[in-house]
Amino acid sequence: MLMDVPLIIYVGAAAVIAAIGLIMWAFLTQAAGASTAADLSGITDMREAVLRESAGDRLLSPILRGLGRRTRRLTPTGMIDNLDKKVRYAGLSHKWPTERILAMKALLAIAGFAFGFLYFRSNGGGMGVLVLFGLGFAGYMAPDFKLNKLAETRGREINYQLPDVLDQMTVSVEAGLGFDAAMARVVKEDEGPLCDELGRAMQDVQLGVRRSDALGAILERTDSADLRHFLLALTQAERLGMPLARVLRVQAKEMRHKRRMRAEEAAMKTPVKLVFPLILTILPALFVVIMGPAAIRIMDSGVFGG
């Protein structure tokens, strides 16, 4: 029975299993990346640092990097730049370099094509061809969809956190602290994507980067219109010599108003979003409960010739 199965089926199944295994390994190794980096922080011998890694990491990491480099050479420059931007907006530059994302795209595309080929071998026809290329394309684009979702979520978190951060900075500046000290206090007491970006800007300033350039670099790593508006207003206020406390207070008030307007907009969209679940789930059950007994009585009465 097994001898009747074509060899290409075994090859496709092996490709699918290998691709899925590599994908799972890549995600699982990233989950433990922070602890591994902490364990290797005090090691200066390169050979000892490499030997501290697991055998799987030493074996599969070069494969994944090589696959990512080859995929980069085959990918248009515009798509790579767009992918770099998505990685920055999602806040994954330090965890998921572009080569790793490209390797994931290649592996998912291979897995999709392998599944599609198995379906094509079994069914054939136009639908088989459509499934073959559709699964391959879906696998290749899956990381982009995930990055877009992460970037959108991160942008919403920054917009939600921005008014509270500005309030704290306003109170600190009005109490006599400088802008850098107020920003350091906020970064120390709070957490979140906005505080992470402000902390990174502070590190750049400590390394000698001008504050305007360090704050401007935040705009390249985030996709928040509110944050962009605040940083541009702050830069202009510094250039014109305006008091920062007043600028911070006005910006905090404006950002609170925007956050309230977004909340009201989301609340107004809720009834519309509930229409389809109501029609598809609650109303049929309601009709069964209300009309069911009446229908049973009508059938028992013999009105329809029973």
Image (cartoon, rainbow, N blue to C red):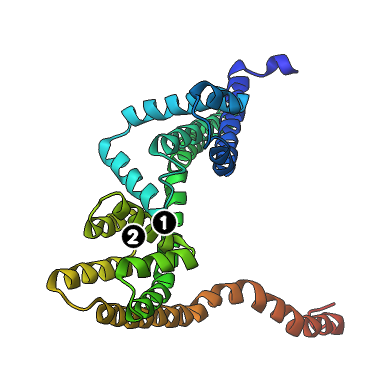
Under mark 2, the amino acid is: Asp
Identify residue for label 1: 151
Label located before the other in sequence (2 or 1):
1
The structure residue drawn at horizontal position 32% and vertical position 53%, both measured from the top left corner, is 206
**Is residue 146 something that shows in the picture?**
yes
Q: Nearer the viewer, residue 133 or 202?
A: 202
Q: Is residue 143 above or below residue 240?
A: above
Answer left or right for 77 relative to 112.
left
Secondary element under disc 1, as helix, strand or loop, is: helix
Residue 280: x and y in percent read 61, 71
Q: Which mark is residue 223?
A: 2
Residue 98: x and y in percent read 39, 38
Q: Crowdedness of circle 1 by 10 Å Cα count: few (<14), some, many (20+)?
A: many
Give the quarter of the image for residue 289.
bottom right
The structure residue drawn at horizontal position 29% and vertical position 55%, both measured from the top left corner, is 205
Secondary element under disc 2, as helix, strand or loop, is: loop
Under mark 1, the amino acid is: Ala
The N terminus appears in which quarter of the rendering? top right
Asked if marks 2 and 1 touch (Cβ < 8 Å), the reply is yes
Q: Nearer the viewer, residue 144 or 29?
A: 29
Q: Crowdedness of circle 2 by 10 Å Cα count: few (<14), some, many (20+)?
A: many
**Is residue 13 something that shows in the picture?**
no
The C terminus appears in which quarter of the rendering? bottom right
Residue 250: x and y in percent read 28, 82
The structure residue drawn at horizontal position 25% and vertical position 76%, both measured from the top left corner, is 244
